[in-house]
């Protein structure tokens, strides 16, 4: 009880104190980053640009998709993997490794 009273007293006394926060302006990028969206379903089917891709052909089709989105001014493409929570980890891992071998940055989003 005594500590909760002290905590409340501290809370109300510091509520009006100005925070010691540094405001930093973060630079914005003017060149849009090109993304390749890969979807992995709960049945472990892989889709690139709304087309189903068999696992043995993943490297070649992913390379074609990445090369088509690469820009001369910004050479690094980003592969965004949207994976279902019921998909197997091995499939997600294989897709991310294939993208890394091609030289893309990988972002994994599991839903």
Image (spheres, rainbow, N blue to C red):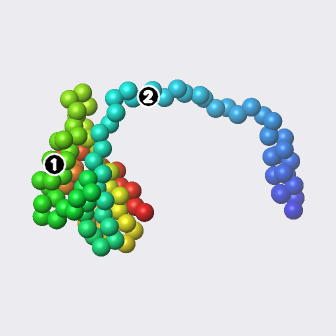
**Above-or-below relation of 28 to 51:** above
Q: Decide: few, some or many residues near mark 2? Use Cα within 10 Å; few <14, some 14-19, many ≥20.
A: few
Note whether residue 93 is visible.
no
Most extreme residue toward the front is 50
Q: Which residue is mark 2?
A: 28
- The mark found on residue 99 in the picture is none
Mark 1 and mark 2: Cα distance apart in space: 28 Å
In the image: residue 13, left or right of residue 75: right
**Above-or-below relation of 78 to 18:** below
Q: Where does the C terminus fall, quadrant-wise?
A: bottom left
- Which residue is nearer to you in this view: 101 or 12? 101
Q: Residue at x 23, y 40 (%)?
A: 69
**Above-or-below relation of 51 to 25:** below
Q: Secondary structure at mark 2?
A: loop
In the image: residue 77, left or right of residue 6: left
List x then y, in percent, for residue 78: 29, 44
- Which residue is nearer to you in this view: 71 or 90? 71
Q: Earlier in the sequence, mark 1 or mark 2?
A: 2
In the image: residue 10, left or right of residue 26: right
Q: Residue at x 34, y 29 (%)?
A: 31
Q: Residue at x 24, y 45 (%)?
A: 104
**Above-or-below relation of 105 to 91:** above
Q: Where does the N terminus fall, quadrant-wise?
A: bottom right
Q: Residue at x 25, y 38 (%)?
A: 76
- Which residue is nearer to you in this view: 40 or 17? 40
List x then y, in percent, for residue 61: 15, 53
Note whether residue 16 is visible.
yes
List x then y, in percent, for residue 48: 24, 55
Q: Decide: few, some or many residues near mark 1? Use Cα within 10 Å; few <14, some 14-19, many ≥20.
A: some
List x then y, in percent, for residue 41: 32, 67
Q: Secondary structure at mark 1?
A: helix
Q: Which residue is mark 1?
A: 63
């Amino acid at each position: 009880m005594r500590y909760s009273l002290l905590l409340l007293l501290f809370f109300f006394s510091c509520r009006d104190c100005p925070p010691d926060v540094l405001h930093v302006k973060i630079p914005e990028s003017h060149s849009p980053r090109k993304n390749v969206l890969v979807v992995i379903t709960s049945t472990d089917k892989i889709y690139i640009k709304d087309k189903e891709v068999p696992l043995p052909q993943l490297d070649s089709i992913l390379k074609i998709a990445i090369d088509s989105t690469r820009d001369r001014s910004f050479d690094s493409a980003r592969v965004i993997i949207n994976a279902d929570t019921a998909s197997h980890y091995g499939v997600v891992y294989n897709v991310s490794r294939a993208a890394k071998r091609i030289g893309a940055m990988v972002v994994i989003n599991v839903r």
